[in-house]
Image (tube, grey):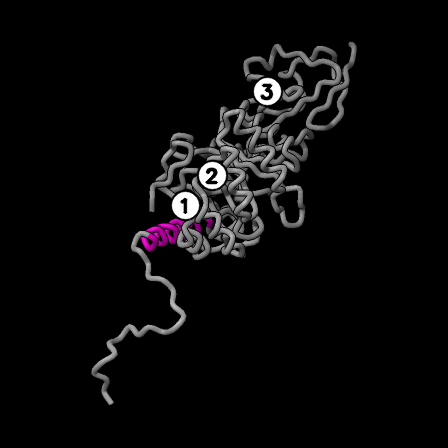
């Protein structure tokens, strides 16, 4: 597979990790280490004002080494382009992060991304110099429009966030991959290492997982399993797999039968 | 002392006029090493927290990075 380069940065791992839902910062850090991932996403949130309801401070950033991983704030929680742009600007001003995983999800039940607002926000953020990685439904036309707007990658969903259902949008992801000039990162819904491997075998440049790892009984082991599956799929793609056929094709010699 | 009305993370509050951001954070028992503060959408640098005075109707956001993948 050709080297994965996003906005000039080279990645030796095709596995990106979301850092939400882990039971603790140290469990998250261990999983990131085991995964060998070089890109993780974080979220920006309001601090609880009343100290009684404030959860014990465990700043996620302190568990991550920016020298080893690219830290990418996401705009989760944004329901409109305007909200997403505001979150991205605050993230940049707070920590100097100019990569952003753009998520605009007004729909509460399925957390599906709003294509119109996502495109609008992407145009603004690209103009402001952000490296924009938009989370989208698996819509090849939208992927094209975002690429034209200057996003550094596209991140189509495999199935709704956190559902662990694997690739339900395969036919459309295939078209996105066929047409894209920017890296395609399959995101959301990947529940098992085999799902991640299937995405790479389809031709995706990378995958992102969070829930599958964070909610596993042993997150570090699951992270390692994903990393191995992704690597296996990468080797498989490079080994030029034989194509599919409708009818059987014998793999044993068709002569010299004992009968 | 005169009071002003501000919003902190969407909650209305009445505080002393001219209060600094640093004082506001300590009155809320928030450790300012771990948070970023924005007033009317502009992030205030850590060094400026002690001399940035709040004015009536200011919108203060106290934010921090948390774990996040998709929406959580």
Q: Residue at x 33, y 47 (%)?
A: A1
Q: Residue at x 38, y 73 (%)?
A: A247
In the image, which disc is placed on residue A153?
A: 2
Element marked by disc 2: loop
Q: Determine the main secondary structure of the stretch shown in magenta.
A: helix
Q: Is residue A107 left or right of residue A223?
A: right
Q: Is residue B29 left or right of residue B1?
A: left
Q: Check if mark 2's residue and mark 1's residue have beta carbons within 8 Å.
A: yes
Q: Is residue A190 above or below residue B21?
A: below
- Does any portion of residue A60 appear in the rendered image? no
Q: Estimate the spatial distance between the alpha carbons at disc 2 and disc 1, rounded to whole Å.
A: 10 Å
Q: Estimate the spatial distance between the alpha carbons at disc 3 and disc 1, rounded to whole Å.
A: 35 Å
Q: Is residue A153 left or right of residue B14?
A: left
Residue assigned mark 1: A205
Give the mark nearer the N terminus: 2 vs 1: 2
Q: Is residue A17 above or below residue A242?
A: above
Q: Check if mark 3's residue and mark 1's residue have beta carbons within 8 Å.
A: no
In the image, which disc is placed on residue B43?
A: 3
Disc 3 crowd, CA 10 A, few/some/many (<14, 14-19, 20+): some
């Amino acid at each position: 597979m050709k080297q994965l380069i996003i906005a000039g940065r080279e990645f030796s791992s095709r596995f990106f990790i979301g850092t939400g839902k882990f039971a603790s910062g140290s469990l998250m850090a261990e999983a990131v280490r085991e995964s060998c991932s070089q890109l993780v996403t974080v979220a920006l949130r309001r601090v609880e004002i009343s100290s009684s309801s404030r959860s014990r401070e465990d700043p996620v950033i302190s568990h991550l080494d920016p020298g080893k991983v690219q830290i990418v704030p996401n705009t989760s929680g944004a329901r409109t382009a305007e909200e997403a742009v505001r979150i991205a600007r605050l993230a940049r001003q707070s920590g100097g992060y100019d990569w952003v995983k753009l998520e605009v999800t007004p729909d509460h039940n399925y957390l599906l991304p709003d294509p119109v607002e996502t495109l609008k926000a992407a145009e603004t953020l690209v103009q402001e110099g952000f490296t924009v990685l938009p989370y989208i439904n698996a819509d090849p036309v939208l992927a094209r429009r975002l690429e034209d707007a200057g996003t550094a990658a596209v991140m189509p969903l495999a199935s709704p966030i956190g559902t662990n259902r694997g690739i339900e949008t395969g036919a459309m992801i295939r078209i996105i991959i066929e047409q894209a000039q920017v890296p395609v990162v399959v995101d959301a819904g990947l529940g098992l290492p085999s799902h991640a491997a299937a995405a790479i075998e389809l031709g995706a440049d990378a995958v992102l997982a969070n829930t599958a790892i964070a909610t596993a009984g042993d997150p570090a082991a699951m992270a390692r399993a994903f990393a191995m599956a992704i690597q296996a799929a990468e080797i498989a793609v490079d080994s030029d797999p034989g194509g599919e056929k409708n009818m059987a094709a014998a793999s044993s010699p068709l002569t010299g039968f004992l009968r | 002392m005169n009071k002003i009305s501000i919003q902190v993370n969407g909650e209305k509050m009445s505080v002393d006029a001219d209060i600094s951001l640093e004082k506001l954070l300590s009155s809320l028992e928030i450790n300012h090493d771990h948070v970023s503060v924005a007033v009317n959408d502009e992030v205030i640098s850590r060094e400026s927290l002690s001399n940035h005075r709040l004015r009536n109707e200011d919108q203060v956001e106290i934010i921090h990075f948390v774990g996040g993948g998709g929406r959580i």
